[in-house]
C-alpha cells in the first residue's frame, strides 16, 4: 500500500515512471471498496430533516434529536423497527439491509412523518 499523502499526483507520476522504465514495479490501481454508509436525519422544530432520505441497502440511518423536547421514531406500514425516546442531543441508529420504502413517524407527535427509501446495493 502506498500512501499518496498531500501530493497524490506527484506520487502517481513517480510510480508510472518506474513502471515505464521497466524496473519491475507492479502497479495496481483499484477503486475503493464501497463501505456501508451512515446517513443523517435531524429532528428539529417538530420535523424530520430531510423528511425523505434515500440510502443504499446496507447503510445505517442516524436520527439526532436537536429539538428541546423528546422525540422517537417508529416504522409504519407493517415495519417493526423503532427508536426509543431520544432527549435533546440523543441519537438512534437503524441499519437498512433490504431495498424498499420505509415510512415512519414520531409516536409522541404523530404528525411528524418521514420516509427512508432504500435502493439495492
Image: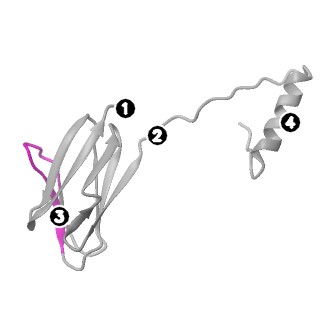
Res 3 label: none
List x then y, in percent, for residue 61. 31, 51
The residue located at (9%, 49%) in the rendering is 76
Q: Is residue 79 magenta?
A: yes
SS label for mark 2: loop
**Quadrant where the image shows the N terminus:** top right
Residue lying farthest to the bottom in this orientation: 68
Q: How far apart, in angstroms, are the residues tagged by discs 2 and 3?
A: 27 Å
Q: Quadrant of residue 15?
A: top right
Dot 2 or dot 1: first in sequence order is 2
Location of mark 4 (residue): 14
The residue located at (74%, 39%) in the rendering is 2
Left-right relation of 24 to 93: right
Res 72 label: 3
The residue located at (32%, 31%) in the rendering is 120
Location of mark 2 (residue): 35
Q: How far apart, in angstroms, are the residues tagged by discs 1 and 4?
A: 36 Å
Tell me if mark 2 has few (under 14), some (14-19) or many (20+) residues whose alpha carbon lies within 10 angstroms of its own.
Answer: few
Please say if the residues under marks 1 and 4 sit with CB atoms less than 8 Å apart.
no
Left-right relation of 22 to 111: right
> In this figure, which colouring scheme has been used for the structure?
one colour
Dot 4 or dot 2: first in sequence order is 4
Please say if the residues under marks 4 and 2 sit with CB atoms less than 8 Å apart.
no
Q: Is residue 98 magenta?
A: no
Q: Which residues are magenta?
A: 70-82
Q: Is residue 93 above or below residue 4?
A: below
Q: Nearer the viewer, mark 3 or mark 1?
A: 1
Location of mark 1 (residue): 121
Dot 1 or dot 4: first in sequence order is 4
Amino acid at each position: 500500500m502506498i500512501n499518496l499523502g498531500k501530493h497524490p499526483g506527484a506520487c502517481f507520476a513517480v510510480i508510472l515512471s518506474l513502471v515505464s522504465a521497466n524496473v519491475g514495479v507492479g502497479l495496481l490501481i483499484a477503486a475503493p471498496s464501497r463501505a456501508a454508509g451512515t446517513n443523517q436525519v435531524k429532528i428539529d422544530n417538530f420535523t424530520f430533516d430531510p423528511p425523505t432520505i434515500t440510502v443504499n441497502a446496507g447503510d445505517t440511518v442516524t436520527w439526532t434529536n436537536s429539538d428541546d423536547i423528546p422525540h422517537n421514531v417508529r416504522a409504519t406500514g407493517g415495519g417493526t423497527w423503532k427508536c426509543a425516546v431520544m432527549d435533546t442531543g440523543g441519537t438512534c441508529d437503524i441499519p437498512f439491509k433490504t431495498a424498499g420504502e420505509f415510512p415512519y413517524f414520531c409516536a409522541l407527535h404523530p404528525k411528524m412523518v418521514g420516509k427512508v427509501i432504500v435502493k439495492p446495493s
